[in-house]
Image: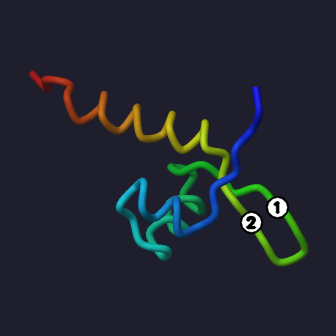
Amino acid sequence: MALVVLRLPHVKGRTGLSRSTIYLRVAEGSFPKPVSIGIRAVGWLESEIESWLSSRVEESRRVKA
């Protein structure tokens, strides 16, 4: 399985979150951490972003009693 690394514009597009919200949630530990792909470049693993999105969908659809 090949790993796909998404740069920030793609992560923003997939999640609907702004840059500042993404980095705030990374700092809080509620969003996947980026991986270094160069001296001044980071990206996010597509599989981790997809997993994060799936967990948000599941959480939002739970019936709270």
Determine whether 63 is above or below 36 in the image.
above
Q: Position of residue 3 (x, y in %)?
A: 74, 38
Residue 42: assigned label? 2
Asked if residue 35 is positioned above or below residue 19 in the image, the reply reads: above
For the residue pair 29 and 47, the one nearer the viewer reads as 47
Callout 2: SS: strand
Q: Are marks 1 and 2 in contact (CB under 8 Å)?
A: yes
As shown in the figure, which amino acid type bears the numbered disc 1? Ser
Q: Residue at x 19, y 29 (%)?
A: 61
What residue is disc 1 on? Answer: 36
As helix, strand or loop, the secondary structure at mark 1 comes to: strand
- Quadrant of image for the N terminus: top right
56 or 1: nearer the viewer: 1
Percent position (x, y) of residue 57? 30, 34
Q: How many labels does the image show?
A: 2
Q: Which colour scheme is used?
A: rainbow
Q: Seen in the image, is 55 located left or right of residue 4?
A: left
Looking at marks 1 and 2 on the same chain, the residue that comes earlier in the sequence is marked by 1
Nearer to us in this view, 59 or 10: 10
Closest to the observer: 24 or 57? 57
User: Residue 10's mark?
Assistant: none
Disc 2 residue type?
Val
Quadrant of the rendering where the C terminus is positioned:
top left
In the orientation shown, which residue stands out farthest toward the front?
A: 2
Circle 1 residues within 10 Å: few <14, some 14–19, many ≥20 = few
